Image (cartoon, rainbow, N blue to C red):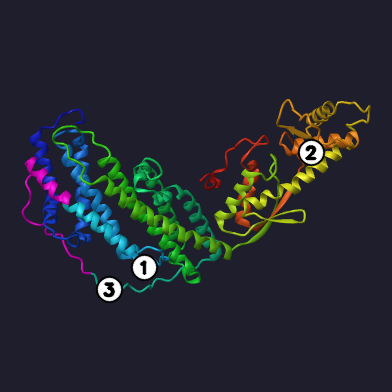
Amino acid sequence: MAGEIIAENDFNKLIAERGKILLALVRRMSKCQSYEEVIVRPLLGKLLSQSTQIEELLDAYGAGTNCRWCGFRSLVAAIKGFSDISYELLHIQNVLPGYCLLSTEEDFFKATNETLEFTSNILLQVSKKLLVKAEELKLPIPSEDPEDISFTEDLPKGRLPHLCERRKIEIVSETVTLLATAFLNLAAESKDVCAASRAKPTEYASYLSGSVSEEKLRSLQLRFHNLQSLYDTYVSGTEAAELDADLPVLRGHISVVMHLLRIATLFAHHYERHVNRQPCNSSTRIKALVNGDELLAVLINYSINHISLFIDCAVHLCQEKLKRYAEVGRIDLPIPQYRGFHVRPSTLVAKIVQHYGSEVQMRLDEEVYNARLPLDLFRANEKINAQKRRWLTDEIVRLNLVHEEAENIDIKSVVLGVVLTLAGRGKIIMYEQPLQLPDEPARRQGSLIEKVIAEMARSLAMGKIDVDAHMNATFVGDKRVLNDIKLLAKSGYGEDKFGNNVPLPEKLGYLRR
């Protein structure tokens, strides 16, 4: 019962009986002379299974908060965690030849071997400490190895032939673009994690409390796992991989990133739970089993660094696939209401285009702008502002808002009257209220209406007023990119008519990173 206290003798008997296989494995492993003896899947698989069961049993009885047993529980958790990591690393090592990975500037196979040596050495050290702790707790240690465990793994070379009939897929381009787009979106979500690969050693710990926390790594791992499942459900076993040889390459990158994220999550978990947190202050407390700095270095230099490298390679691959299967379209969209294509709208449009790696043009009258470059879009404001000035002039003349009168008339009062009249009719927006005009006139010579128009144009250029000229720009390029730009335009290009930030749709979440 939850409220009852179990007798120490009864609990000892329970753990002695249920833990005998684990202790036998640990005794056998503690005698290993090299990490190659530890890194075999039958041993690691059994270690993981048994340590998981014992950890769950210990937790069910509250061993983690009991000074007599919390140290034993920590050692079992370390066996579980590092046997799990080692199994993942061994999996990567064994399937690496079939992943069709693009080459990077680093030797991934060598780095995986070095990380395996690191984790297996930890397993050896923890095994010896667990035996010492078991003796302290008077737990009997079996003298013989479990009969059903093989400590070698001799595997014949080769693969079984592919005899199953390949499923047909109607439109390969749709499948490719779906997967490529999904990968690019995940790559954008991974930017904060990948940024840690460029960190200095003194910054590693700060990343563990931010973008490389266990929580964030696990969330990202699940997203890549879902993407791999999407591939395996709709692409594996189809003709698509034969029709487009880059698909197996993409699948390899999705899979290796997923496994690396799982390894990173387990490293981060051990650091956060067992290195960076020591809740028990009793004399029986187990000291940190792993050097924190060494653990962080392996987490960043192996897991995060190679996650970043393989994502970057696949991003270029996906962008090239989208270019190849691009379906070109065109769409007319309103220009940003607040000050045209200034910094924020131009940057957001360019980020969408860069995200997909496509070529998109923006056309305004006879001018063509490269939508991939914010500065080129910003250049469109020259034409936009010229048209706004012409519109202002036409409205002032059409509405007969300026009357020629005496020479000493106050220009400021006339301009303010024109501004208030146009604002009252919803023709312009006032960003400065009350409007303050410079003492020095914009124009000294000319008619009254020319002076008023000059003052209005200056206020427009200074951002004190703006004109809703209902202008459209035409975007030409890949329809997938145009759809996202259209969604951005519906959201006011990220701002309202006064230039304040507005939330972007979830589909455009990659723009926030």
- Amino acid type indicated by mark 2: Ala
Q: Secondary structure at mark 2?
A: helix
Horizontal and vertical percent position of residue 449: 88, 35
Binning the other alpha carbons within 10 Å of mark 3 as few (below 14), some (14 to 19) or many (20 upward) gives few
Q: On the picture, is 352 further left or further right than 258?
A: right
Binning the other alpha carbons within 10 Å of mark 2 as few (below 14), some (14 to 19) or many (20 upward) gives many
- Amino acid type indicated by mark 3: Lys
For disc 3, the marked residue is 157
Give me the disc on residue 57.
none
Q: Which residues are magenta?
A: 125-154
Spatial distance from mark 3 to mark 2, Cα to Cα?
78 Å
Closer to the chain start, of discs 2 and 1, is 1
Spatial distance from mark 2 to mark 1, Cα to Cα?
66 Å
Closer to the chain start, of discs 3 and 1, is 1
Q: On the picture, is 59 further left or further right than 102?
A: left
Write the residue at 43% across / 71% down. Answer: 165
In the picture shown, does residue 272 fall above or below 359?
A: above
For disc 1, the marked residue is 98
Quadrant assignment for the N terminus: top left
For disc 2, the marked residue is 457
Horizontal and vertical percent position of residue 281: 19, 32
Write the residue at 57% across / 51% down. Answer: 351
